[in-house]
Image: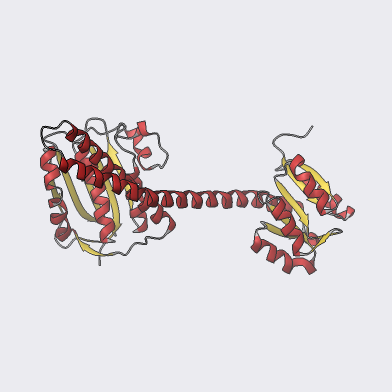
Amino acid sequence: MVNRTAIRVLLIEDDPEDIELLQRYLRDDARHEYAIGTAERLEEGLARLDSFKADVLLLDISLPDSHGISTFHKAFSRAPDVPIVLLTGMEDEKLALEAVKSGAQDYLNKREVSSRVISRAISYAIWRKKAEDLLKREALHREFIANASHELRTPIAAIKASAETLGRSLTAPNPDRELVRIIESQAERLRGLVEYLLDLSMLESGQRPALPESISLQAFLPEFVAGFGLLAKKKKVKIDWKAPPGFKVWIDRSHLDRILQNLVDNAIKFSPAGGEIHIEGKPSGEVGLISVRDSGVGMPKDQIPLLFQEFADKAARRTKGRGTGLGLLLVKGLLGANGGRIEAASSPGKGMTFTFTVPLGR
């Protein structure tokens, strides 16, 4: 009985001596166990793919019923999800290179094969194929998110505009005004989520590169903090800032604004009435440190690493069901695009501090 953990290798080769030699090399590999299936013709081998369920295909490029690059193309079209390692002679190496460019994982000259070489080629082929498939899925995921977000923009805008129009037509004390206000508020929340998704998608795909410049925090922060004046007053929290004269950071201006917007917005959301939020910037060696500290609910230390993970359990977030965590993912991505990084520190009931690094300004 075949070991279920064995690497399943389908060998399509017509030379009996080569078949015996390759099988012996695989048997001699002490690091892996192999289940080996063989076929002497291409069609025979491809017919066995479904029943044998190969992890990797070792394919001679010159067979009785197929020769040259077409051998690879036939196999690849029949089994695009199975990694293919080509077996060649010296005269076939140019064709093998062409096949690698078209999707083959590797090629081996049969006259230079050893147990170590073939084992490494098989392992490399399997893991490279998995990596390629993962990259393709991630690309499709980003494309879907971007397309879906674009499509959602129009109906959300229509809902918001319709709610605003309806609200203007209702006079107090009509009870429906509160329902309209809720519709407007939730439509605006959806719009924000869509924008976050679009920003994340464009950032991950490289469509929104950073355009850094030297920014003085003493010039940037007063206007930035003033923009939160009404919200801070409504929530009854105080926001202050501190940065030494001449302290500059090297970062895309719009990215810095978006990063701090997210962090300060979160700080306001989780700070109690009478709470304080402190923004501080200072140099530290060859980088600049910028921190946002609040006096809010905080969170357990063991849950902090989950804040920046894309699929972390929502229950592990400080949001307690009131948010998605997309803002912090965007912050992490924007900082990465500018050569920076972020970390958080907290404990329950003692607030949260986010500290990020960016290059010093010039």
Numbered label tally: 0
Residue 110: give x, y in percent of width and height. 79, 59
The x, y position of residue 254, in whole percent, is 26, 59
Q: In which quarter of the view is residue 232 placed? A: top left
Position of 201 compared to 92: left or right? left
Residue toward you, 107 or 327: 327
Image quadrant holding the N terminus, namely top right
Task: Tell me: residue 98, above or below residue 271.
Answer: below
- Residue at horizontal 42%, vertical 48%? 148
Instruction: Name the residue rendered at 26%, 56% in the picture.
Output: 256
x, y (%) of residue 213? 27, 65
Q: Is residue 153 left or right of residue 107?
A: left
Query: Which one is nearer the viewer's eye here, 114 or 342?
Result: 342
| Residue 215 vs residue 132, the one in the foreground | 132
Quadrant, the C terminus: bottom left
Q: Is residue 147 left or right of residue 220?
A: right
Asked if residue 294 lies left or right of residue 204, the reply is: left
Q: Residue furthest right?
A: 16
Looking at the image, which residue sits at the far front?
A: 169
Residue 309 in percent (x, y) is at 40, 42
Residue at 28% across, 42% down? 187
Residue in the foreground of this view, choosing between 153 and 233: 153
* Residue drawn at x 19%, y 60% as measured from the top left: 247
Determine if residue 57 is in view: yes
Q: Is residue 330 in sight in this rendering? A: no
Q: Residue 296's quadrant in the figure?
A: top left
